[in-house]
Image: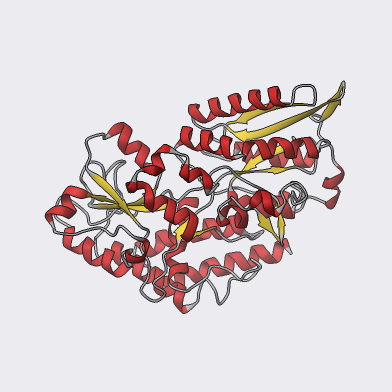
């Protein structure tokens, strides 16, 4: 994942692209003097990420000198959707590159509209067995693999060690002993003072909401959508889903969380615990090196006693506009090889998408990082695959903001159901 961005804005025109997109070819694709020319697009990330991709493409070109020549274009995403809009425009004009990077939830939309093609023939089962299950699920649509990534993401419960020690509270160190949401609620009440909230549950107002909090529903035995991603009534508004979000609401209406926290409230002692992505570790270690903190597992519900953790990250797919799909597959295989996964994830502080790389990355030899490894391998749950996912995500985010202010959970979710049904009908 990544540092969580805003939700994907997949404009309706993408959903209405005609089937003849499969016949389009990109002006970027060519073969020159027997050398296959391929182009890859990715969002312009942090400087370390930019440097990684530049070096990786150089290494690939050296490895396949005289056979394949790859070029890289990094496109700013900003606070809007410049990157996605460029993909949409290229699909419409028939000028797609060979490979595009995309956030996990967009895979179904791009597959459905014909922007990306299946890659099963290039990635057989033996090549995929080392990947964590969630990254395969994320890239699979209607039984076919469309995308593959090098990294994963997860959310853990950070805690102020000094505060918990003073209260005589010991955080769980094994997956089996993970706290329940009821325990987290009781601890939050115990630790709240006039100067400190019990827990920080603040996320961005877009994609971060469904990414971070959908696991509450899954852990309580509920669902967001039907398995095929087409039905929401009876799933998101089921008793189990409503019950989970009613518990989430308790933290807000009882004043256990700050509804308008400042950045780094946790690190500055304004909240005792913090539910946040594992990438927060890098922020703490770089900006608050003396802060005494720990991490433990994403909370579970006692109903199932099952930890379900967020997952999903950027991944790569081969476009229908590529004239050199076999060469593009070689680049995709290179970028997701164990060596490149380790180098990429070490550079940007993300969990690897390959199980074996957890054993070779130095940071995961530290016992304190065991939580991240456990969750990525054993409890990760991708966001649902649906052509109407963008609507689900945005409406879910709006509903959670209403729920935090005390709006009836059933009423808030009813609006999501209505909007989703309107969009899925339009797509069909």
Asked whether, in this view, residue 9 is left or right of residue 25, the answer is: left
- What residue occupies the far left of the structure in this picture? 166
Can you tell which quarter of the image residue 91 is in?
Answer: top right
Residue 19 visible here? yes
Residue 410 visible here? no
Asked whether, in this view, residue 424 is left or right of residue 132, the answer is: right
Asked whether, in this view, residue 59 is left or right of residue 383, the answer is: right
Q: Using the image as rendered, state which of residue 410 and residue 132 is in the foreground.
A: 132
Q: Using the image as rendered, state which of residue 110 and residue 17 is in the foreground.
A: 110
**Where in the figure is residue 378, as x and y percent of width and height?**
48, 59
**Where in the figure is residue 379, as x and y percent of width and height?**
47, 60
**Where in the figure is residue 93, as x and y percent of width and height?**
80, 38
Decide: is 176 above or below 302: above
Asked whether, in this view, residue 397 is left or right of residue 285, the answer is: right
Residue at left 51%, top 47%?
Answer: 152
Residue at left 64%, top 25%?
Answer: 59
Residue at left 45%, top 76%?
Answer: 240
Q: Using the image as rendered, state which of residue 52 and residue 127 is in the foreground.
A: 127
Decide: is 320 above or below 37: below
Q: How is the image coloured?
A: secondary structure
Residue at left 59%, top 24%?
Answer: 55
Looking at the rendered image, the quarter that the C terminus falls into is bottom right
Decide: is 185 above or below 319: below
């Amino acid at each position: 994942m990544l540092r969580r961005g805003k939700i994907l804005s997949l404009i309706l025109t993408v959903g209405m692209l005609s089937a003849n997109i499969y016949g389009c070819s990109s002006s970027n694709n060519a073969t020159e003097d027997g050398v296959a020319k391929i182009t890859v697009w990715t969002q312009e990330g942090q400087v370390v990420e930019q440097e990684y991709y530049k070096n990786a493409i150089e290494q690939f070109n050296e490895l396949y000198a005289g056979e394949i020549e790859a070029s890289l274009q990094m496109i700013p995403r900003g606070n809007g959707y410049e990157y996605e809009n460029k993909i949409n425009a290229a699909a419409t004009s028939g000028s797609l590159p060979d490979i595009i990077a995309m956030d996990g939830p967009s895979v179904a939309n791009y597959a459905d509209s014909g922007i990306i093609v299946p890659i099963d023939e290039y990635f057989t089962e033996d090549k995929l067995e080392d990947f964590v299950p969630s990254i395969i699920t994320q890239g699979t649509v209607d039984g076919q693999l469309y995308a593959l990534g090098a990294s994963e993401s997860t959310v853990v419960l950070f805690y102020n060690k000094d505060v918990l020690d003073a209260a005589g509270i010991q955080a769980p160190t094994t997956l089996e002993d993970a706290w329940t949401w009821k325990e987290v609620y009781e601890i939050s009440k115990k630790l709240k003072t006039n100067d400190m909230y019990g827990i920080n549950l603040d996320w961005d107002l877009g994609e971060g909401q469904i990414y971070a909090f959908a696991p509450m529903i899954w852990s309580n035995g509920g669902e967001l959508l039907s398995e095929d991603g087409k039905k929401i009534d009876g799933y998101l508004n089921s008793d189990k889903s409503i019950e989970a979000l009613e518990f989430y609401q308790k933290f807000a209406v009882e004043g256990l969380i700050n509804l308008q926290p400042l950045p780094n409230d946790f690190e500055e002692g304004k909240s005792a615990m913090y539910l946040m992505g594992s990438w927060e570790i890098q922020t703490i270690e770089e900006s608050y090196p003396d802060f005494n903190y720990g991490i433990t597992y994403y909370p579970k519900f006692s109903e199932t006693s099952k930890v379900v953790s967020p997952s999903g990250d950027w991944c790569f797919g081969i476009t229908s506009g590529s004239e050199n799909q076999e060469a593009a597959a070689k680049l995709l295989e290179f970028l997701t090889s164990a060596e490149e996964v380790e180098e990429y994830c070490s550079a940007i502080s993300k969990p690897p998408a390959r199980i074996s790389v957890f054993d070779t990355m130095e940071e995961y030899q530290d016992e304190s990082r065991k939580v991240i490894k456990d969750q990525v391998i054993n409890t990760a749950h991708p966001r649902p695959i649906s052509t109407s996912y963008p609507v689900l995500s945005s409406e879910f985010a709006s509903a959670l903001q209403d729920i935090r202010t005390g709006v009836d959970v059933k009423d808030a979710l009813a609006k999501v159901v209505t909007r989703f049904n309107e969009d899925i009908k339009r797509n069909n």
